[in-house]
Amino acid sequence: MSQSQARRFPFRPELARDGQHVAVAIVGAGPVGMVLALDLAKRGVASVILDDDDTLSTGSRAVCWARRALDICDRVGIAGRMMEKGVTWYDGAVHFGPEPVFQFRLASPGDAKFPAFINLQQFHVESHLVEACLAEPKIELRWLTRLAGLSQDAKRATLELATPEGRYRLSADWVLACDGARSQARRLLDLEFKGQVFEDRFLIADVKTDIDLPALRRFWFDPPFHTGQTALLHKEADGEWRVDFQLGWNADPEVEKRPENVVPRVKKMLGEDRKVEIAWSSVYTFQCRRLDRFVHGRVIFAGDSAHQVSPFGARGANSGIQDADNLGWKLAAVVTGEAPAALLDSYDRERIHAADENILNSTRSTNFIAPGGAIAKIARTAALRLARALPFARALVNSGRLSVPAVLDGSPLNTDGAGFVPTKGLRPGAPVPNAPLKAGGFLLDRLDLGFTLLAFVERGGTVPAPETGWRVVAVDPKTESAIAQLFDAEPGTVCLIRPDSHVAARWRRYDADAVRQAHARCLGRAAPAAAPVPHAPAEGLIRRESNFDDADGFYDDLIAMTQGLGDEQARLVQAKLLLILANQIGDRAMLAEAMRLARQGEEP
């Protein structure tokens, strides 16, 4: 057990004052709750964090921290400590059976302030966050304080809290439910999680062993050490390794996580002569679910209390931290009177959009990793075999689409000026990357905690001076050509950047009235901009007339090519052929119409 895991935090009875009222109460001292508290504090808003435990989490849990989460953690002051201990990685490898299929690179070192990912056990991150919260006068941590009751009216929420010395009541203007997948707040409000629970189980474990391998993500399909299943290996801090083994739905969780059963699995993976010590193990099931809404009156849900995804892809905790990033500035604006409470509806809309994107990607990963049915298994095998020789098929191999921040398309806060191609440059709703500046430093470090106007001005040009007093960051599009290209900017282009470093609006030329209107829209004080009218899908994409010079000869050749194949081989070849032809078509609508025509009269 590490020093972080061994830490215990005392219950402080002097803080349990019955009838006290606070502006913000946060339920859950996990990464999401503490990042939210620190973000609010930087914006001048005090909060109380309530947690039913007196320790940090056990085991690695959320071990992979993506670049966007590191950017957010940098703003609240802990990214440097995370980098000191975390294991940096940019690369991954996919294996099928005993052989490697391909490797991939997520990003290049030096293209941003932080790497694509670091691996760091969750309890280390929590330890850094606790230290930061304890050093912040606007944050009060109350341990061994369990949420036992929750009610609300139009003006406030009332929490009944159970402690080692009895119960007391606390009221709050806002309650932020960051209490995880088994959320007590969600249970007390009788809110339903909707979605899918997949019938499969996975063993995860942190192990100490004497191997020395480069830090890259290794994923196996049907490896010889775990036949017919999948496995994952990651390097962690403290000389530990994270292993994941697919078990199947009928596995007994209590039996599988016993050390005497975990050790042999790990030795089969790494080598029978390896020393293996189990630091922690658990068994989980895939779940892709969320609440219908995240904002329920005075109670707002964030992180796993609001949505759950399978762990492959590192989308859980990273998405939760982005929830905190989205909610913090909005709630601070509401609490300080800068914005109406209706602004919080945009948190609901934007983060449900992000959650649905994560659930979609997580569900697709799950369906590839644990395919249901013979056809799905054949299609997966076809993709894996093609991927060895054909680069296009590597895009089909889904061992977990790794976490990326959502582009908040369709947000009521977005404004897009005329003259931009919607698919070119960072459009409204897109997150701004922390790209390096030739002048030194990084882009996000130049932005303000509030709104920032990014102005692309050539040397000697006039820099806009908005009346609002926001920070204006001038960028020379010639000197900083990479930044200009990132924003599809030319001399005179201006972009309004939100406090959570998403693009709020962009214009080819500065217009003070347009900027003021976009700013008001971002604070919920102006109507949303008109949304573009979507194009109707094209019809009749499939050619009906013959495209063959010699139809009979073509048909004879097709039949001859499949001669000598058994039923299983024929199905696999057909699946490969379908994937190759789909790549040649390159049009999802055309593929869907072709499949519809092919299935006519053959529906079960």
Image (cartoon, rainbow, N blue to C red):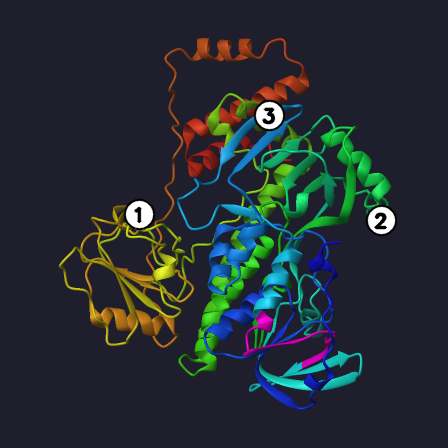
Q: Which residue is rendered at x = 77% and y = 32% of the image? A: 267
Q: Which image quarter holds the N terminus?
A: bottom right
Q: Is disc 2 surrounded by few (<14), some (14 to 19) or many (20+) residues within 10 Å?
A: few
Q: Is residue 375 magenta?
A: no
Q: Residue furthest bottom?
A: 19
Cα gap from disc 1 to disc 2, whole angstroms: 51 Å
Query: Which residues, given as a range, are shown in magenta?
Result: 133-150
User: Label 1's element?
Assistant: loop
| The image quarter in which residue 527 lies | bottom left
Task: Let me know if residue 52 appears in the view.
Answer: yes
Is 202 situated left or right of 332 in this image?
A: right
Is 32 situated left or right of 551 in this image?
A: right
Above or below, 356 relative to 570: below
User: Label 2's element?
Assistant: helix
Q: Earlier in the sequence, mark 1 or mark 3?
A: 3
Which of label 1 and label 3 is nearer to you? 3
Q: Which residue is rendered at x = 32% and y = 52% of the image? A: 440
Which of label 1 and label 2 is nearer to you? 2
Q: Which residue in the protein does label 2 denote?
A: 254
Q: Which residue in the protein does label 3 denote?
A: 100
Q: Which residue in the protein does label 1 denote?
A: 424
Q: Check if mark 1's residue and mark 3's residue have beta carbons within 8 Å.
A: no
Residue 240 rendering spot, x and y as whole percentages: 69, 44
**Kind of residue indicated by mark 1:** Lys
Q: Which residue is rendered at x = 66% and y = 31% of the image? A: 221
Q: Earlier in the sequence, mark 1 or mark 2?
A: 2
Cα gap from disc 1 to disc 3, whole angstroms: 36 Å
User: Label 3's element?
Assistant: strand
